[in-house]
Amino acid sequence: MSDPLVQPLTVFLPCGYLVVAMLYSMAFAGEAQPSIARIRTPLLRMLLVLHVGLFALHGGTVGGFPRFDSWLVLSAVALNVVGLFAVITWRRRQPTVGSLVLFAAGTLQMLASMFGPTAPIVERGPSSAITAMHVLTVIFASAAVVLSGIYGLLYLVLLRQMRQQTFGALFRRLPDLRQLARMTRSAALAGFIGLALGVNVGIGMAHARGVEGFGYTDTFVVSVLAICVHFGLIAFSRRIRGLTAQRASWAAVGGLTVLMAALAVALVPEATFHSLR
Amino acid sequence: MDSVEDLVLVGLSQRTAPVAVRESCSITAEHADALLRQLVRGNDVDEAVVLSTCNRTEAVAASPDGARAIAEVRDSLFRGVDDEHVYSFRGVRAIMHLFRVASGLDSLVVGESEILGQIKRSFDVSAGADTVGPFLRPLFTQAIGVGKRVRRETSIGDGSLSVARVGVEVAARVIGRFEGRSAAIVGAGETGLLAARHLLAHDVGRVALLNRTVERAAEAAVGLGDRVEAMGLDVLGPELEKADVAVVCVDGASSLVTPKTLDRRKLARRDQPLVLLDLSVPRAVDPAVGKLDGVLVYDLDALIPIVEENRAGRAAAAEEAAPILVAEVHKYLSLRTFAAFSPAIEELKERFSREREHLIDKVTAGQATPRELELAHEMEKKLLGLALGQLKESARHTQSAAALDRAYRRFVDEIAPGQE
């Protein structure tokens, strides 16, 4: 039996994220933004607590660490995206960037809420700490990769505006190009470290348990390693000759697109995030 | 000074006088001290403050007779200057003008904030010369407060109105902070030096000042500090490639910077694009440069609309400032009226006190207990408070806010037609 609070939370969270995204987008109005926009930060923190609460309820329902099916993974990525954003902007506010980040998180959570199973919610997963670490680091890395892609997209949009000499709200309110490039690379670095750690732990577990069908030629394993290397290159692109901020941003957007496409393929109902159980 | 009409303001500014006349009437701080002392030495001026900036010279005076004070100030500060260049205001109009000046509404660049500091310094000079007293001290304190309030509550100071500054702000959207960054200025003329000053004010790490004649660049660099290096145009290409932001402002040198000037491979390898601001007329940067990878080119056609937009924003803010100024003039007049009641208030307090003692003696036959005395004191305080409250209310209604608003709009129409 699922907890009675799971259903309302599942419905409330995506709506909440989209509302907060809307409040953050008001920052584009600058000084003229309505006073209601002030509630966005406390509201965002409340949603974070509720989202963590949702996972706690899942854990409580199964009496341990839940097995992450594809939709639960999506929800966890959304939670991590928002969490990372909240941490990054704890001191240095970036409300205009927040509108896009929270819109993306809201969309991910919307998909998770719409298509994810509700009853029984989740099964109990393997209870080892190593498994939990594997799952959590990969999810954290995915969130960082999503952020890197979003920041990269904003860099490209702003650069385009500058080339076209359009001095509108995006030009005035987004962080400057150099800062966006730094954010893209920092998020990519977090993604690279998380993926490297998570994937290696996963490979180690597969070896230790002698998982049938596991191998370095496996499409899934190769894809994840490729994404890891891809974002590693973006993270260290300042030191790579010719890999300018603009090219790194294109690469981050490309990486995010590929990741989303892979998720879309993987997110077949009843399918798990990967078949290596 | 009995009436507010005896408060006068006489002066000239960029609105009424050409620069040559303004220069001839300019007063240094040292000269101001002697002038102020001389003004109050006679019988026509009790208090005086002189404000002298590059765009205006004005004197505000409190006097026993407004008409004579105007003549005295006119003679002391603007002797020999044509009447068409000098304005004089009395009473409410003088207060309105002073508040407008403090708010930056009467400045050449509407909303500029430098004037507020200049007013403070002028007031300090007058205080030092002991020529401010009970009339001008509160007036100038309030004028400075009005200036701050208008800037705080309206967008009068938002957006730059100089192309060089707007260009630097655009560059900041690309490279963020200027600390440790490198800049190149091509042309050691007025605009080039202005741009260099803006960049140095933003703590740019290094400025290469390039000019056709290196001597001229070196001469200009001396006044800009040790972060500026003077060079000739022979190193134009390499210096542009090194810079994070470059400002080109040369006269009559079309296509000084072409795609051939720059090394495309180096540009393509830059992490962030070079911001190239072309402030020259005719353009000195070939439009084809803007199509290269790693360069963002902005010329005057791109920057002037931002300046115009900022100017329009400030004009709208000037309209927003009108109710604030009217309310502040109203407040000043109410305070003045209330201050005029001071002798009457003192007398009222004394009478209340006498009546209290008389009554308590009469009722208790001189045998009042401490409790009865305390009660009598409390009643006196309460009744006096009510009476003073009524007085304040009357003072507030001496001038109707609506009438002041109409007077303000007439005044603005008269001095700056079409501004508000």
Image (tube, coloured by chain):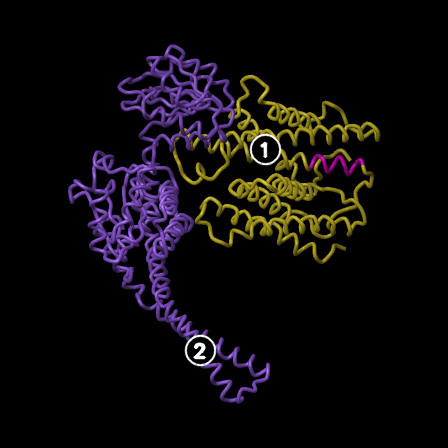
Magenta range: A130-139
What is the chief secondary structure element of the magenta stretch?
A: helix
Q: In this view, does A61 lie above or below B219?
A: below
Q: Which chain is purple?
A: B
**Residue B286 appears in view:** yes
Residue at point 29%, 42% (across, down): B35
Give the x, y percent position of residue A238.
57, 22
Pointer 2 chain: B
Numbered mark located on residue A148 in the image? 1
What is the CA distance from the residue labelled 2 to the residue labelled 1? 78 Å
Residue B176 sits inside the magenta stretch:
no
Dot 2: element: helix
Residue visible at 40% across and 74% down in the picture: B348
The quadrant of the picture occupied by the N terminus of chain A is bottom right
Horizontal side of B325 relative to A222 (left or right) equals: left
In the picture of the structure, the residue carrying the numbered disc 2 is B352
Q: The yellow chain is which one?
A: A
**What amino acid type is highlighted by mark number 1?**
Ser
Which chain contains the residue that carries disc 1? A
Where residue A31 sits in the image (x, y, percent)? 45, 47
Q: What residue type is labelled 2?
A: Phe
A134 with respect to B213 (left or right): right
In magenta stretch: residue A136: yes
